[in-house]
Amino acid sequence: MFTSKDIEQISSKKIKLKEIENQLLNFKKGFPFVNIVRPATKKDGILSLSDDEVIAYVKLFDDLLPNSLKFVPASGAATRMFKFLFEFYNIAKDQYKDLNDIDNSEVIKFIKGLEKFAFYNDLKDAIKKNNLQIEDLIIEGRYKEIIKYFLFESGLNYGQKPKGVLAFHKYNEKIKTAFEEHLTEGARYAKSEDKNVQIHFTISNEHRELFENILNENRSELEKEYDVNFEITFSQQKPSTDIVAVDLKNNLFRNDDNSLLFRPGGHGALIENLNDLDADVIFVKNIDNVVSDKFKDTTVQYKKALAGILLSYQERIFNYLQIIENNDVESNVIAEIEEFIVNDLCYNFSKKPNVEDLFEILNRPIRVCGMVKNEGEPGGGPFWVKQLSGEENLQIVESAQIDQANTGTLNILKLSTHFNPVDLVCATKNYKGEKFDLLKFRDLDTGFISKKSKDGKDLKAQELPGLWNGAMANWNTIFVEVPIITFNPVKTVNDLLRPEHQ
């Protein structure tokens, strides 16, 4: 099946041939749907904190002040943010008599809101460099030209840049990118006792210089403002996590030069990057989920509260593990541990567990996941899931993992009350202070297969188990309700017109 050049190409990515064979097998057999039993809800899998509990958990975190790190997936261009602008540009007339002649409400909203965007002055300057005035273009209905200078290399080139380096928020004359907002947010909850703030961004190597330039321009000002020292590191998805593509008959898809086509393994590949990091507490948050300063207090408070819950659970888990290791296990303690696993870790056994079973379940990485009330956002949510072995536990499940043709499953989906905003706090060390190998806690049967195309030819692409789905499937999981104000993603450019971003 593989030519000598194929094997050389595979080897250059540090992928084992057996792994490619497994990928091809996955294409042929597909991935099974997740067996959701019911949605996780308040009092059935999701903790709901009182104001006093929030304060207590924040205090616990502040008192212990563990060695913390913030992990921000930030790779990839922001092209999807501007999908409607690209589509309009491809069919737009050079000039319109009236803005309402445009048959696209999102484009109208974008043009009407131009002055409210943090990038407005930069766009204005880019247009001016071409001996034009943005005000004249608006009056003359030359909207296509405005969008050209916004999206393409002749202007701001936002269509090819990553979200992290785009101007998100404006403070009088000061503009902040999403990258800078993560620095200011991290300075408020990921600060160590010696005032160091560790933040790790996963980026594309081609964009690294853009991030480093922003860091170099703003580091000293931000460090002075927040009295911290930033320790900023970057990494990229490893070539070894790329996945070979196939045609619709599951034959290897080849480029015009007959080489194999590899595609990135999706955000699930980042479990390898996370696995390389060393900290006692790791905060995980997407690059586009930030707010302007006036809305940050609640976000910071709940980040600390989630971390406090993590430390509280971890202390109890470590205590039980020490008891078991020391063979100091009386029948009443065994019953207590089993009750804790069932009621607090939300893990239902398929058969009566022995002491070894209890130890194995406790001795896992821990994640505390913030959940917001579902207001119709697309994406994953918290569910009780039944495993092939019969156990039931908590999982974050994406819609693509659910059998949409199954009426019973769809009814369970409709009962879902909460949504996954990717608001995680993780502990990746065991009770002896040793790092877990996170790759051992994945469910490799939870990947994704989708239909794509290249050069006009259809192909099938495969993604690894998602970072907060299958890649963390065998972690101990605690779901906690957090306020909706802590979730403010920027999926399209017009989201920046929302009050939280103004």
Image (cartoon, rainbow, N blue to C red):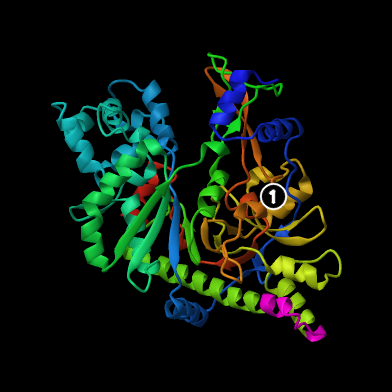
| Residue 498 as seen in the image, left or right of residue 481 | left
In the image, residue 391 sits, relative to residue 86, either above or below, namely below
Bounds of the magenta span?
320-332
Query: What's the magenta bit mostly, secondary-structure-wise?
Result: helix
Secondary structure category for the residue under label 1: loop
Residue 109 in view of the camera: no
Residue 123 among those drawn in magenta: no
Residue at left offset 35%, top offset 28%: 101
| Residue 248 as seen in the image, left or right of residue 219 | right
Q: Quadrant of residue 70?
A: bottom left
In the image, residue 237 sits, relative to residue 140, either above or below, namely below
Percent x, y of residue 323? 70, 80
In the image, residue 338 sits, relative to residue 388, either above or below, namely below
Residue 331 among those drawn in magenta: yes
Q: Which residue was labeled with disc 1? A: 443
Q: Amino acid at mark 1?
A: Asp
Q: Quadrant of residue 387?
A: bottom right
Name the quadrant of the C terminus: bottom left
Q: Nearer the viewer, residue 231 or 480?
A: 231
Dot 1: few (<14), some (14–19), or many (≥20) neighbours within 10 Å? Answer: some
Percent x, y of residue 336? 75, 81
Residue at left offset 20%, top offset 42%: 121
